[in-house]
Image (cartoon, rainbow, N blue to C red):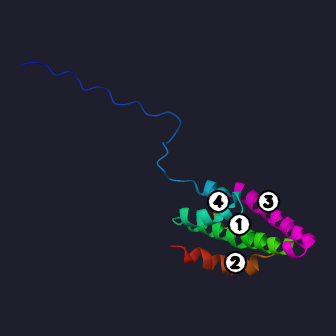
Amino acid sequence: MSQMPPPPPGQPAPMGGTPATGASNAKTNVILAYLLWWVTGIIFLFVGKDDPDVKWNAAQSVVVLGGLWLISTILYIIFLPLGAIVWIVGLVYWIIFLVGAFNYKGGRIAAPGIGQFTDQLTDQLANAVK
């Protein structure tokens, strides 16, 4: 009888932690949902539909930042200084949302001052996307 050689050794374990399997990080998705104002918010409404917090933050990006962008654009046409003021308010909210996203530990990032008015619309938009 002949002897069979031992099987080849298994592949070494990859270094650097767990391999990426396509599962996305919620914090990264929330940052990206706010990154380019309402544009990435629309994208992450559909991309983040498996995570309700990502989807809600993306919907808030569309409602708050998209709404302020639309209002400022209309006001630019009618009365330039008023449009510029609304755009600056939008810029402040964008910075608040980005800082909140970088410090994200889960949940929803509050819109200071206007959250009581926008939360219901944000909930409706987040729940409308399946």
Relative vertical location of residue 59 with respect to residue 97 in this rendering, above or below: below
| Of 119 and 128, the residue lying toward us | 128
C-alpha distance separating marks 2 and 3: 19 Å
Magenta span: 77-104
> Horizontal and vertical percent for residue 129?
54, 73
| Of 45 and 51, the residue lying toward us | 45
Three-letter code, disc 4: Val
Three-letter code, disc 2: Asp
Q: Which residue is mark 3?
A: 95
Judged from the image, the secondary structure of the residue bearing numbered disc 1 is loop
Three-letter code, disc 1: Ile
In the image: residue 113, left or right of residue 35: right
Specify the principal SS of the magenta part.
helix
| Of 113 and 78, the residue lying toward us | 78
Q: Residues within 10 Å of mark 3 (few under 14, many from 20)?
A: some
Of callouts 4 and 1, the N-terminal one = 4
In the image: residue 23, left or right of residue 126: left
- Which quarter of the image is occupied by the N terminus? top left
C-alpha distance separating marks 2 and 4: 17 Å
C-alpha distance separating marks 2 and 1: 11 Å
Instruction: Please give the label number shown on residue 119.
Output: 2
**Please, which residue is most extreme toward the front here?**
77
> Horizontal and vertical percent for residue 83?
87, 71
Which of pointers 4 and 1 indicates the residue nearer the eye? 4
Regarding residue 54, the answer to whether it shows in the image is no
Q: Residues within 10 Å of mark 2 (few under 14, many from 20)?
A: some
Judged from the image, the secondary structure of the residue bearing numbered disc 2 is helix
Q: Which residue is mark 4?
A: 30
Q: Which residue is mark 1?
A: 109
Q: Which residue is painted at 69% across and 61% down in the image?
A: 34
